Image (cartoon, grey):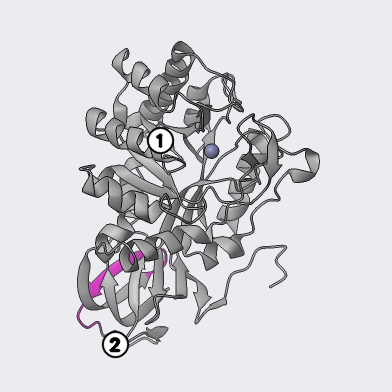
Amino acid sequence: MLTLIRGTDVYAPNPIGIRDVLISDRTIIRIAHRIDIEGIDIPIIERKGFKMIPGLIDNHVHVLGGGGEAGYHSRVPEIGIDRLIKGGITTVIGLLGTDGFTRDMKALIAKVKALRHEGMSAYALTGSYQIPPRTLFKRIEDDLLMVEEIIGLGEIAIADHRSSQPTVKELKKAIAGAHVGGLLSGKAGLSNIHVGNGKDGLFILMKMLEKSDIPVSKVHPTHINRSLELLDQGIHYSKTYGATIDFTTGLKEGPLSAHRAYAHAILSGVDPGRITFSSDGQGSLPVFDEKGNFQSMGIGDVNSLYQSVKKAHHESGLSRELALGPATTHVAKIYHLSSKGRIAEGYDADLVILDSDDEIHDVFMRGRQAMNERSLCITGTFSNE
Ligand code: ZN
């Protein structure tokens, strides 16, 4: 099946100008000033005056629902595909969080398979906050080798009263397992590390990197914009070790919001290609007092990913290409998603079309139109839309 999208201003994410884009089945097969198909009738979508960007990749979503830190009633529900599509997300990496006890990897993989069935490009990380990691098989390596959807480990928690308080040795062993599993299965084998509010911040990771041969590219700490101290430490960490870091878009607005942290990190000399954004969607955002007592609860919203990309351009003044990077090319490279994150011939047809206000107007997931003129064409099995 062929589909032709005519006349959008394409940010691939680098600006390539007004182009026609031809999709065959799941793949972009031609990008040109003008494409004419003769002899057969194919769907033609006219979008002059609109912009096209790559579908977004969200590398940290609690697709099964996270939370539970205020008791059983605070377990967050599963995400529906509708919310992801509305947020311009066409690729999602699902993971477990604090609750690696009542939630497990079987349920996570089942959810990822369900999202795939509905059209999303969905992947999973094995494990949860805890070490030893909550794996499907006995070893992390086996999970990566035997389960197609699993591409890494995480989120392993450090510097947090909710973590299993791992030692450097324990952390190193788990990250090495993911690395070797990744090598043998041809996947990223990356470890996503949740960094909490604890005093040590990234200290344990730096200690581990200094005392091991594990490539720094295999460690991807997240929530680096949760405090000014951690952001400063994250900038130092990235510059010193050539390391990647992730900013959470679902945190509260303010000086530490992801787009501001990103602009600040670039100004401080961090290589932008080493920075990703993720929403922490469907995770709980519990607020604790200084003694660790629970205060109140919020839920991470996947829509915050696109909002941060948009603000990185409109509010922080970054180019569209730089603003899109953390949710497209940067994250695709770090997670070895080789056909994702870019509008180019041979890449997956994961596309978002924006109107003149930069609002999401159309979404394509691997060539299937998921949103048309702001209305969903694909909805979840149990959706009420
Ligand atoms: Zn986390």
Residue 380 place in picture, x, y as percent: 65, 63
Residue 303 place in picture, x, y as percent: 52, 61
Q: Given the image, on which type of amino acid does mark 1 rest?
A: Leu
Q: Which residue is mark 1?
A: 230
- Does residue 157 sit above or below 213 in this rendering? below
Nearer to us in this view, 78 or 241: 241
Residue 159 included in the magenta stretch of the image:
no
Mark sitting on residue 38 = 2
Pair 2/1: label in front: 1
- Does residue 153 sit above or below 321 in this rendering? above
Q: Which residues are magenta?
A: 24-35
Secondary structure under tag 1 reads helix
User: What residue sits 69% from the left and 63% below the top?
Assistant: 381
Rendering quarter of residue 49: bottom left
Quarter occupied by the C terminus? bottom right
Nearer to us in this view, 41 or 104: 104
Q: Is residue 110 left or right of residue 366?
A: right
- Does residue 277 sit above or below 16 in this rendering? above
Rendering quarter of residue 324: bottom left
Quarter occupied by the N terminus? bottom left
Q: Given the image, on which type of amino acid does mark 2 rest?
A: Glu
Secondary structure under tag 2 reads loop
Query: Callout 2: few (<14), some (14-19), or many (20+) C-alpha neighbours within 10 Å?
Result: few
The mark nearer the N terminus, 2 or 1, is 2
